[in-house]
Image (spheres, grey):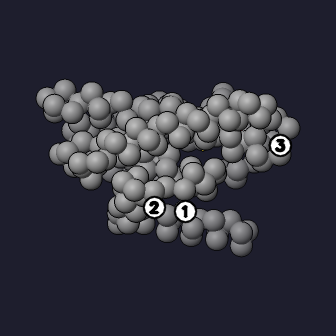
Amino acid sequence: MPYALVTKEYDGAYFASGEFRAINPMGKVPVLCDGDRLIIESTAIMDYILNTHGPSELGVGPDNPEYSAYLQWFYMAESGMANYIAVSFGHRSGQDHYWVSDEFDTYCRLQVTKALEMLESRLADRDYVVKTGFSAADISLGYTLFFAEFAIQPGFTGNVKAYYDRLMSRPALQKALALQKALGDLAHKG
Ligand SMILES: N[C@@H](CCC(=O)N[C@@H](CS)C(=O)NCC(=O)O)C(=O)O
């Protein structure tokens, strides 16, 4: 699909500004703008694209026997993993407004550990979340694992490590990372 990528400087003051909060009152990225519709929450954005611009082989429907697992991982990657990683990452950043107690940080990391153990079992007999192949659930998880790797370094092993390497080597992801790097280099040059 054709799209225009608008990058924003990762700047707390700008995210808190009236200008940005008119786009996303939560002061976060990403935001999707489709015509006059603005939608936030990365998983909701994927769901929206799949349902309004599909059908796509990335979307798994109720006719697939593994539909429930697809939905579970599609949502859980963000709500049950990335959110905890974000809290822990913020806590370690040293910035006052992200501070939480050490006990809550431990709790957050435990949620991620449990989810990774669950994913390890899920991947015991398959390359992706559903046996029919790569889907939007793997995109959700791919982002979350990528985030975990640099934010809290959980040290992937076994099936999760193999899965992460498989996702990272996908040409589409490599293309997105190259674009991200090029945009970063441009921003540095001013
Ligand atoms: N659940 C949200 C999380 C969004 C989120 O936390 N975005 C981060 C960047 S990955 C952000 O903008 N953080 C800014 C902040 O919290 O100040 C989603 O899936 O879109």
Question: Considering depth in this image, is 37 or 31 the residue closer to the camera?
Answer: 31
Q: Secondary structure at mark 2?
A: helix
Residue at 68 percent across and 35 percent down: it is 106
Estimate the spatial distance between the alpha carbons at disc 3 and disc 2, rounded to whole Å.
29 Å
Estimate the spatial distance between the alpha carbons at disc 1 and disc 2, rounded to whole Å.
6 Å
Q: What residue is pinned by disc 2?
A: 176
What type is the residue that disc 1 sits on? Gln
Question: Considering depth in this image, is 175 or 144 the residue closer to the camera?
Answer: 144
Residue 102 at least partly seen: yes
Lower sequence index among marks 1 and 3: 3
Q: Secondary structure at mark 1?
A: helix
The C terminus appears in which quarter of the rendering? bottom right
Depicted 99 relative to depicted 159: above or below? above
**Side (left or right) of 66 relative to 25:** left
In the rendered image, residue 92, in percent from the top left (x then y), is placed at 76, 46
In the rendered image, residue 37, in percent from the top left (x then y), is placed at 47, 30
Q: Are marks 1 and 2 in contact (CB under 8 Å)?
A: yes
In the rendering, which numbered label is found on residue 95? 3
Q: What residue is pinned by disc 1?
A: 180
Residue at 40 percent across and 52 percent down: it is 160
In the rendering, which numbered label is found on residue 39? none
Quarter assignment of residue 51: top left
What type is the residue that disc 2 sits on? Ala
In the rendered image, residue 14, in percent from the top left (x then y), is placed at 76, 43
**Side (left or right) of 23 relative to 60:** right
Quarter assignment of residue 30: top right
Depicted 124 relative to depicted 70: above or below? below
- Badge 3: few (under 14), some or many (20 or more) residues near its Cα, within 10 Å? few
Q: Secondary structure at mark 3?
A: loop
Residue at 63 percent across and 50 percent down: it is 152
Residue at 23 percent across and 30 percent down: it is 67
